[in-house]
Structure formats: C-alpha cells, structure tokens
Amino acid sequence: MCTGRVDLAHVLRAFSNGVDGVFIGGCRLNECNYTTQGNYHALNKVLLCKKIMEHLGLNPERLRLEFMSSGEGNLFAEVVDEFVKNVKELGPLGQGEGIDENGLKLKLKAFTKLIPYLRLVESERLRLNFDSIEEYTEFYGSEELTRLFSELVTDKLAISQIMLLLQEKPLSTGEIAQLLDLTPSEVSRHLNSSAKQGLVRYEESQKRFALA
C-alpha cells in the first residue's frame, strides 16, 4: 500500500488500542512506485500528527516514518530494531509521559473526533510542496507553523476535550481547568464560544456547565 494512503485515523486507532509506538515505512522520496508521490503526503501527515501529539503531552518519538527501497532489508531491520528499543525506553503510552489512563483516553478520543476537520486543515491550509525532508521539518519547526497550529488546531482540541468531559457530567469552569491543565480564563473563553453555538448551557442551580 502506498504511504499516501496513511491517514491520521490509522495512527490514532493503533494508539487507542494500546500500541506504544507506530512505525510507517515508505519508498524513498522521488522514487514512488505509483508515481503519485504519496510519500510526500505521508511525511506531511506524520509531521502534523507529531505536532498534535506533542501538544497533547504525548512523546512524538512514538511515531516514526522512514523512507527506504524494497531492496534495503538490512536497513529496514536496523531501523525497526532501533525504533522498538526507543519505544521500550519511553515506556507504555501515557505512563511514560505521566498521563493517567483516563486522561490518555480523553486526549486520544478528542484527537480522533477531530480527524475529519484535521483532514481539511491538512488539505486546504497545510498542503505543502517542498522537495526535501529537511524543508518539511524546518517548516514544522517554524513560527509560521506555530501560528497556524494555534489558529487552526489548539482551540479545537481543547473544545473537543471539554465536550467529552461534559458528556459524562456537568462541570464548573474550575473543574474543567484542573482536569485539562488549562487556565480558568481559557476554559471560560471556550465555554462562551460553545454556548453561543448552542453546544453547552450554564445550569444556574448547580453553578456548572452541561451539554445543551
């Protein structure tokens, strides 16, 4: 299968099922077997996924993409052995980052619910056309990407987590802030925005927010 078919949903499904690391192997750039250059699309998606993982407190080294030819069996074995060793050193997913089981489930579920939106972001705002891995990596470490990520992704992820928490029970601004490690003002901003959209309501009797 061409790595161009790799989707964020595939990666998230693996992590959600308890996998501690995900390895993706593809043909070398500019040597695409299908002439679609899908490996460039895979590189972009993996770098975006790593950025989101880092934002959620998950070690991005748990996801790795490597390019090699089908004749490089020895290199493949070496790279996979190295990746497995690194993942073992990181420890179990979540535990290695100091995230409790419920917190991990919340983060992964919030991420998963945003996949359709993130596909649009990647397609319309982050469809890059660089010629090398170095150029992609440099862009994903740039101030421009940080600005775009903040504008397009950060708030969406926070709101997704808030909606999942409120599915369980009504919560106050302070309780949500504590659970998500956000400031009360950040949570208030997200709740006010969601209330205007008719997604949440404030229950005066309980002094808590609930899903509308």
Image: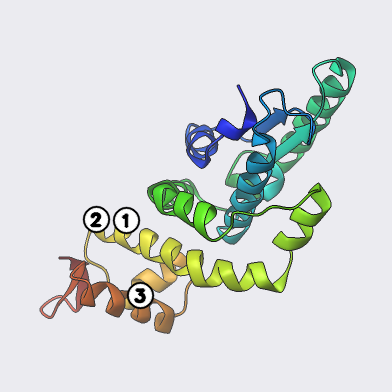
Q: Residues within 10 Å of mark 3 (few under 14, many from 20)?
A: some
Q: Residue furthest left?
A: 205
Q: Position of residue 103 (x, y in %)?
A: 46, 53
> Which residue occupies 57% across, 46% down?
94
Q: Which of these two is toward me, 123 or 148? A: 123
Image mark for residue 190: 3
Disc 1: which residue: 164
- Residue 99's place in the image compared with 64, above or below, is below
Task: Give residue 177's quadrant in the image.
Answer: bottom left
Task: Give residue 210's quadrant in the image.
Answer: bottom left
Q: Position of residue 126 (x, y in %)?
A: 58, 58
**Kind of residue indicated by mark 2:** Gln
- Residue 108's place in the image compared with 19, above or below, is below
Q: Position of residue 108 (x, y in %)?
A: 46, 47
In 3D space, how far apart are the residues under numbered discs 3 and 2 (Cα atoms)? 16 Å
Q: Which of these two is toward me, 153 or 131? A: 131
Q: Quadrant of the N terminus?
A: top right
- Residue 23's place in the image compared with 128, above or below, is above
- Residue 181: in sight, yes or no? no
**Which structural element holds mark 2?**
helix
In 3D space, how far apart are the residues under numbered discs 1 and 2 (Cα atoms)? 5 Å
Q: Position of residue 136 (x, y in %)?
A: 74, 54
**Kind of residue indicated by mark 3:** His
Contact flag, marks 1 and 3 (Cβ < 8 Å): no
The numbered mark, 3 or 2, whose residue comes first in the sequence reads 2
**Kind of residue indicated by mark 1:** Leu
- Residue 206's place in the image compared with 157, above or below, is below
Task: Give residue 41's quadrant in the image.
Answer: top right
Number of the front mark, 1 or 3: 3
Disc 2: which residue: 167
